[in-house]
Amino acid sequence: MEKIDIPKKAIYRLSIYHRCLQRLQDNGQETVSSTALAKVAGVKPAQLRKDLAYFGQFGTRGLGYPVETLGSMIRDLLGRERLQPVVLVGAGNLGSALLRYQGFQKEGFEVVCAFDADPDAARSRGVGIPVRSEREIEEFVRAENVKLAILCVPASYAQLIANRLVAAGVQGILNFSPVMLELPDEVVVNNVDLALELEHLSFFIR
């Protein structure tokens, strides 16, 4: 599929649609209406149809969308036809927990290596992938052509490590470090601040 210029928020929603379609396919469902898919994805039907319009005219009135075909089209657009390599920097408690997560490969990603200032301590936490010294980041990222990274280092080191990752060729960072990174506009950063998310949730708890 040719590269399509799609807004970042639409890409995020397409990822959600893909996950929903995968569940439907696992359950043996062959077609799904825009209303039904929008409901399970948590969006309005009009928004879903607008997002899927990036693929051109698709779906059959009265029958809906073919689950397998639509899932394959989204997977192709998102670059998930093959496992995308990912590195993780900072294999402490949070980083090690992420390394033990089994869901990355199902979604098309493979954490191929982790880096830490104390790799021996990280290995003692029982992670199942290689853990190397953070001094080897650039060499590995360039050699393996890695474009995605997960950052779990303390705030005081985050900007420095992010700069090194970008200089080595990383184009997207999932940032768990509690700091806003200043990086070139072409580098995509998704920030995950767990404390902030809990603060947001606590507002609705009475």
Image (spheres, rainbow, N blue to C red):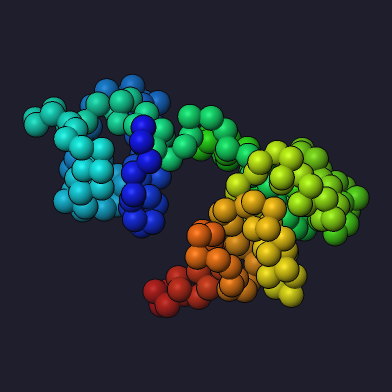
Image quadrant of residue 93? bottom right
Q: Where does residue 85 sit, x and y in percent of width and height?
A: 63, 39
Q: Where does residue 141 sit, x and y in percent of width and height?
A: 71, 46
Residue sitting at x 41%, y 33%? 76
Q: Is residue 51 above or below residue 23?
A: below
Figure disc tally: 0
Q: Is residue 42 above or below residue 109?
A: below
Give the farthest residue toward the right.
120
Evaluate whether residue 102 shows in this view: no
Residue sitting at x 53%, y 36%? 108
Q: Where does residue 97 sit, x and y in percent of width and height?
A: 69, 51
Residue sitting at x 45%, y 70%? 201
Q: Quadrant of the N terminus?
A: top left
Q: Is residue 194 left or right of residue 9?
A: right
Q: Nearer the viewer, residue 29 or 81?
A: 81
Image quadrant of residue 74? top left
Q: Quadrant of the C terminus?
A: bottom left
Q: Is residue 12 above or below residue 25?
A: below
Q: Where does residue 53 sit, x and y in percent of width and height?
A: 21, 43
Image quadrant of residue 192? bottom right
Q: Is residue 158 left or right of residue 7?
A: right
